[in-house]
Amino acid sequence: MADLEQYLERISEHKVNRRGFLAAAGLTAGGAALAACTPGTGGGSSAAPTAGAIEDSLFMYNWSGYVNPDNMTAFQAEFGVTNFVYDIYSNNEELIAKLQGGASGYDVACPTAEYVPGMVEEGFLAKLDLSRIPNQKHIDPAFLGLAWDPNNEYQLPKDFGTTGILYREKLTGEPVTSWQQLYDLTVGTFSGKTVFVDSMGDVFVMPLKMLGKSLNSVDKDDLEAARKILLDLAPHILALDSDTYQDKLASEEAALCLGWTGPLLDLRADPATADTAYAVPSEGSLFWLDTWVMMADAPHPNAAYAWLDFIHRPDIQAAETEYNGYATPNTEARKLVSQELLDDPAVFPPEEVMPNLEGAEDTSGNAQRIDIWGEFKQKIGG
């Protein structure tokens, strides 16, 4: 883990950009829709709620399939939470747009780390009382004090991983190990059989790294060059899909995917899809960190704190890693994860890969990126 620690230290030296909240609100059609749960009080406060009886409800806003169902069931049984609501979003922009549109009533959510500073500035998050999350002590110190939350006040590290290429090797006939190779196959042999996750920040990684640029670049010329690559790709892409891209790979509707490692374990475990592989592209890619946060207007704060502490119990967290296929920052949990998974370079990036990875700054409010993203989405599939 030495290279990982050095890498995270480099991240903490970078200035985090303020998110362009108002601009980003137009990124999703559902930006003005309210959350489908009990409204909160709005406004919010950074003061930690007083500890008390754990409420019988917990409302979570999260990525699809991102929590082990067995752990949710165990939490409900132990703490008497009879009403566990799990709503999903496809990308961070959708999460933010919902909040900007007035959505309230959620207790916890899982934004990617670079979105946290902007969410704090907008008053969406509660300051955490770490005395109520004793299992926070198991978080690897390398993941604490980073630029996204230098005083460890608002986010609790959840999982980390990379953005890369998933592919069905029986269809491609060879490993797919670079962004250039993905581009060539998408516009060529596998036109109409490539899926990208519906996440602006992750998709921009491909063209910028192909150009030898930082994935955080907001240089006008860099982005215009990225625009050309993305618009060349768009007619050949099957779909933008953050939730069910594994199904498209499994059915062979798609042969290639710009995505994450989450579905990889299940796909490889099935003999029919055991040829599924994952690569961190040779040109470099994104290192991401997802985090647990508590909403400022959380209607069930005691249940929220119970959840945040519960999920970082080493045995519970190990079960999360085994279920979702993402690396845990919990050092005690890692001791309980199977050696096979610990040794899997797709899940836990090996030291030789770390120097080729880059952490994200929040560039989602950049007007040029938003313009390119909108044009790209309109041209998907033709």
Image: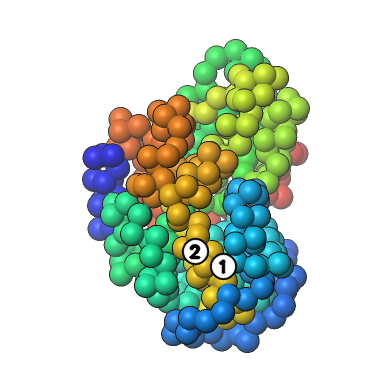
Query: Which quadrant of the structure image shows residue 38?
Result: bottom right
- Looking at the picture, tell me which residue is in the foreground, 307 or 289: 307
**Front-lying residue, 3 or 341:** 341
* Callout 1 amino acid: Val
Q: Which residue is mark 2?
A: 308
Does the rendering let one see residue 111? no
Which element carries disc 1, helix, strand or loop? Answer: strand
Residue toward you, 372 or 164? 164
Task: Let me know if residue 131 appears in the view.
Answer: yes
Residue 318 location, x and y as percent?
Answer: 47, 44
* The C terminus: image quadrant: top right
Whether residues under marks 1 and 2 lie with C-beta atoms below 8 angstroms apart, the answer is yes
* 302 over 165 or under it: above or below: below
Q: In the image, what residue occupies the spot 56% across and 42% down?
A: 324
Residue name at image x 49 percent, y 63 percent: 308
10 Å crowding of disc 2: few (<14), some (14-19), many (20+): many
Which residue in the structure is indicated by mark 1?
108
**350 vs 334: above or below:** above
Q: From the top left corner, tell me how far across and down residue 148 is, in percent.
A: 37, 63
Question: In this picture, is 253 found above or below 108?
Answer: above
User: The residue tagged with tag 2: helix, strand or loop?
Assistant: helix
